[in-house]
Image (cartoon, rainbow, N blue to C red):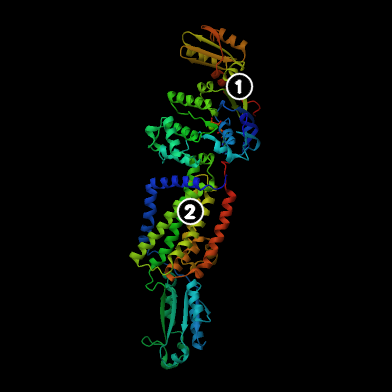
Amino acid sequence: MNGFSFRRFLAVLRKEWIQVRRDLFTLQMIIALPVLQLFLFGYAINSDPKHLPTGLLSADHSKYERTLVAAMQNTGYYDIRSLASEAEAERGLADGELLFVVNIPPNFDRSVDRGEQPTILMDADATDPSTIGNAAAALASLTGTLDRDLPQAVQSRPANLPFLFELHARYNPEQLTVLNIVPGLICIVLTISTLFVTTLSITRETERGTMENLLAMPVRPIEVMLAKVVPYIAIGYAQVILIIAIAAAVFGLPVRGSILLLTLALGLFIASNLALGLTFSTIARNQMQAIQMAQFTLLPSFLLSGFMFPFKGMPVWAQWAGELFPVTHALRIVRGVLLKGNGLAEIAPELWPIIAFTLVIAAIATWCYRETLD
Amino acid sequence: MTAEFAIDVRDLHKRYGDRKVVDGLTLAVPAGEICGFLGANGSGKTTTIRMLCGLIKPDGGGGTCLGLDIVRSAPLIRRQIGYMTQRFSFYDDLTVFENLDFVGAVYELVNRHQAVRAIIERMGLADRSDQLAGQLSGGWKQRLALAACVLHEPKLLLLDEPTAGVDAKARREFWDLIHDMAGEGITVLVSTHYMDEAERCGRIVYLSDGKIVVQGSPDAVARGSGLVTYEATGADLDIAARKLRLMAGVEAAAVFGSALRIAGMDRAALDRAIASPDGGGALAWHEAVPQLEDVFIHLLSQPAKGAS
Ligand SMILES: Nc1ncnc2c1ncn2[C@@H]1O[C@H](COP(=O)(O)OP(=O)(O)OP(=O)(O)O)[C@@H](O)[C@H]1O
Ligand SMILES: [Mg+2]
């Protein structure tokens, strides 16, 4: 008779919903904040990441090609490895394992020697334009690389280059920064409205003394906690829809993948935040402590997830730290589904870390969980 | 399960850090009794009440509430008791009605709306039922809290200073209500700092540093204290009171309207004090029956027994 009671859960949920509705200020903030950020954030990001993973597709590994690849490596921007097939290249780009694919056309050496000016196609993952910007710019300096080996007649002159690069910006052809901002914004806003607000709303009960009353009644803490998070899950999803709708209408954000898949995957991300929020609220004794703990999570969400700074541009230790946070994976999922049209198979590698994180944190929450005031 | 004692706990201990907050407390309250819980600030009243309803776990000892083990069956106990916290702990941003409705829903009452409306009538909250709880004055908040903790018709009420900050008339009504409920067979444990309230209890329990120092009916406690009290009338009572307080054997000297009242344990010393020209020599004295208040002032000024 002391298991979970759905009716008691509904009772607390109804109470929470009244309180959420009465707290107009917070509600307005919740709506206004993401919209403001969406419009304001757009242009700030600038950086110079190096060692970007690059694939090489080539029919015949020729002499000029080797020289060119070495020169690309020397710019510091490209870490090049050979690929077996077009399919591997496509998969690499879709998974985010490759940011560039260099396509050397067949009979490259002969075409150059004959002065046919062959074109090297560079496929680039432009979902995060700031990552690939400088690397792409460095290509221009490479057209003279082959000069030493070339016959006199075809040596590079400004008007007559021995070969050309053609950059093919995939997923985000106009290289709009806003397309990078939107997925990040979705993740950050969800973090704020689920992690932050839930943690606060539970510690508020402790701080105001109403928790003592709640605990003295038959309601179980798990019913209280669930009822507290449900309204904010609803609010979180409303925010996501709002952001996507505005971004699609105003900034032309493409929605290439399945919204249903995105919704389900974000549900997992929300669950990870809630588990963390519950843990914080079992530890925090007052709202100040709760805010500090939540902030401690929010900062790496901004800094290490690849939202503020390109992930590949971070030092290795920071990348490892970033991998721990669900927000990093959620960000890749949102980018993948919205901009690349990723399906379940492609985002699966990002789902596992979130699930693992959620399970570990939920175990900690259960461990710290008090049914008494001690 | 029927139990002769609504509360039956033995040797309860609770420690915070190095401080023994409750130290070997044994208490048995028969069903249907109103038991007053008294003691100085910090003597462990709230802590004891919290242990009784399973909100904190005792470090040692145990027992039953309504025949149910206070440690193992806390969730079952909670359905049958009404606990009114010392600090107002309902939702400021909900109306009186919404707060009560929430409580009713959490207890899964069958005729919830009917029960809520009935309790609102009974507590005289009808005019304020749509007012936000945060906007109520202190006394009305206490009424709301009492209404909330009797809504589900508990068998045992644990009231922690329910009348703090409540005006005299409301306090009277409060206690009439408590007696009504005791008449219906409910057991009440109520902590208070007011003497007139202590006098309305069937039994009083006085705590000092987590230990029970005296308990019994108010009369028995007053008579059994061994305290000697004298009363005098006359002129310049305030000056006499100030002088008397400095004299050996006088534990308390206070003016009540036109009378000066002194108390002490040592009759001979007290007699010397009232006869002395430096003390009460100018006044006409007669011995008085010790009142509960004299006893508590005496107890409050004692260093706790066994404490370092
Ligand atoms: N959570 C806690 N942590 C540490 N000390 C505590 C805690 N709760 C109570 N105490 C200490 O225990 C002692 C008894 O407190 P308690 O609240 O039981 O007293 P009380 O008799 O209810 O006092 P009052 O009349 O002021 O309400 C106090 O000294 C208090 O400081
Ligand atoms: Mg107290």
Q: Quadrant of residue B28?
A: top right
- Which quadrant is home to the N terminus of chain A? top right
Kind of element beneath mark 2: helix
Q: Position of residue A281 (x, y in %)?
A: 52, 48
Kind of element beneath mark 1: strand
Question: What amino acid is found at the position of numbered circle 1 in the picture?
Answer: Gly
Question: What amino acid is found at the position of numbered circle 2 in the picture?
Answer: Leu
Quickly name the residue at label 2.
A195
- Which quadrant is home to the C terminus of chain A? top right
Query: How many discs appear?
Result: 2
Q: Nearer the viewer, residue A122 or A198?
A: A198
Q: Is B9 situated above or below A193? A: above
Q: Is B55 situated above or below A183? A: above
Q: Is residue A291 visible?
A: no
Q: Nearer the viewer, residue B249 or B141?
A: B141
Q: Is residue B60 visible?
A: yes
Q: Is A22 situated above or below A185? A: above
Q: Position of residue B234 (x, y in %)?
A: 48, 8
Disc 1: residue Cβ within 8 A of ligand 1's nearest atom: no
C-alpha distance separating marks 2 and 1: 53 Å
Q: Is B203 situated above or below A52? A: above
Q: Which callout, 2 or 1, points to the residue nearer the camera?
A: 1
The numbered mark at residue B89 is none
Quickly name the residue at label 1.
B216
Q: Position of residue A342 (x, y in %)?
A: 46, 70
Q: Residue at x 49, y 33 (%)?
A: B150
Label 1 chain ID: B
